[in-house]
Amino acid sequence: MEIREYMDRDPSIAAILHELPEELLSTIRIRRYQPGDVVIQRCEDPESTATYIILEGVCCSTCNFKNGEQVWFRKATVHDVFGLYGNFKSRHTYCDFSATIFAKTPSVLAMIPQSTVRLCFSRYVDFTNELTGRTLARLNDGLWRLSECNNYPPYAGVITYLIYAYEFYRRCYPLDYDGAVKIPEKRTEIANFMCINVRTLQRILPQLKAEDLILIQSGSIYIDPPRYEALKERQEQCFY
């Protein structure tokens, strides 16, 4: 499927790219990735960096800390944009940040070459606003969720995180889907995000299952629409 076909069937993708003439749309490539495949390696030459729009699936980044530890850092899903910063940073820009972006689930991405981004940026207002707005919204949402989940006691924090996770992963499914949404995250990933230990999380999850707020099947967490609503109600009860 070419980018024009995605634009025809998805208004959100069309909103980003509708101003671009055909000769520029033709430079955008569709890339498919399997879980674990690397999309961007941060040590690459910035001149080779492209900007990506997620059409299907979920991508994540890992960050290398000073002590050598590699941790799961951020995630992005359908309609999110990443890689924009690399198009504009100078070789002389100091950014002591090392991260690798990879596919967490089977993913389909629209890859916009650096030359196309630089040519279109500011020339096409909607294109510029959509790329920057979606990038900033993704980063702001991640910071907000991190602050919120870490501000609450563990039980309320886990409930809040699961509400957020359901809303995030629900974007991978068709609009008319009304079944259970899988939360494809390891216990360590959730615990690291929330700055709690895994044992605390392992104590809370069975409690939530016993309260019929989540499903756990073969070790994976699932949330359907009724349980999503129940989680929101339970969250309210934690504070009032």
Image (cartoon, helix red, strand yellow):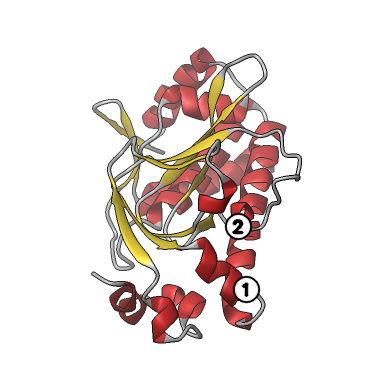
Residue type for callout 2 = Asn
In the rendered image, residue 98, in percent from the top left (x then y), is placed at: 60, 32
Q: Which image quarter is the C terminus in?
A: top right
Q: In the figure, residue 108 lies in which quadrant? A: bottom left
Q: Residue at x 34, y 38 (%)?
A: 37
In the rendered image, residue 211, in percent from the top left (x then y), is placed at: 41, 32
Closest to the observer: 31 or 146?
31
Q: In the figure, residue 88 lies in which quadrant? A: bottom right
Q: Which is nearer the N-term, disc 1 or disc 2? A: 2
Q: Which residue is mark 2?
A: 87
Tell me if mark 1 has few (under 14), some (14-19) or many (20+) residues whose alpha carbon lies within 10 angstroms of its own.
some
Contact? badges 1 and 2 (CB < 8 Å): yes
Q: Which residue is mark 1?
A: 121
Q: Indicate the secondary structure of the residue bearing disc 1.
A: loop
Query: In the rendered view, does 137 fall on the left or right side of 81?
Result: right
Q: Indicate the secondary structure of the residue bearing disc 2.
A: helix
Residue type for callout 1 = Phe
